[in-house]
Image (cartoon, helix red, strand yellow):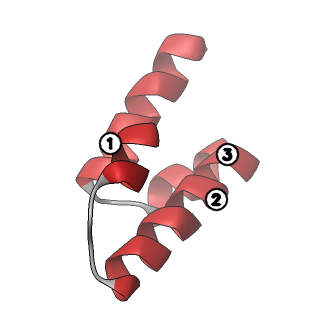
């Protein structure tokens, strides 16, 4: 998520990515389903390694 924050993106994209990241952090299942982007995949990969 640190790399995501450094990227410049439009407001909608930033909000979506932050929401997805927040949901993944708060709820692994819901967050993963709610974030079908490369951001979600990267976060899911990190979650999978932690498990």
Q: Which of marks 2 and 1 is nearer the N terminus?
A: 2
Q: Position of residue 14 (x, y in %)?
A: 41, 72
Left or right: where 2 falls relative to 36: right
Give the numbered dot on residue 2: none
Real-space Cα distance between discs 2 and 3? 5 Å
Answer few, some or many: residues within 10 Å of disc 3's Cα (few below 14, many 20 plus, some between 14 and 19). some
Give the numbered dot on residue 25: 3
Q: Name the residue under label 1.
A: 41
Q: Is residue 34 above or below residue 38?
A: below
In depth, the one of 5 and 31 nearer the eye is: 5
Q: In this view, does 2 lie above or below 35?
A: above
* CB within 8 Å, label 2 to label 3: yes
Q: Where is residue 37 in the image (x, y as percent from the top left)?
A: 28, 58
SS of the residue at dot 3? helix
The answer to which quarter of the image holds residue 42 is top left
Real-space Cα distance between discs 3 and 1? 13 Å
Q: Residue at x 32, y 42 (%)?
A: 41
Q: Residue at x 35, y 41 (%)?
A: 3
Q: In this view, does 11 lie above or below 33?
A: below
In depth, the one of 21 and 27 nearer the eye is: 21
In depth, the one of 18 and 37 nearer the eye is: 18
Give the numbered dot on residue 23: 2
* CB within 8 Å, label 3 to label 1: no
């Amino acid at each position: 998520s640190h790399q995501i924050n450094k990227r410049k993106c439009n407001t909608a994209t930033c909000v979506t990515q932050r929401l997805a990241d927040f949901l993944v952090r708060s709820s692994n299942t819901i967050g993963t389903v709610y974030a079908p982007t490369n951001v979600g995949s990267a976060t899911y990969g990190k979650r999978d390694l932690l498990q």
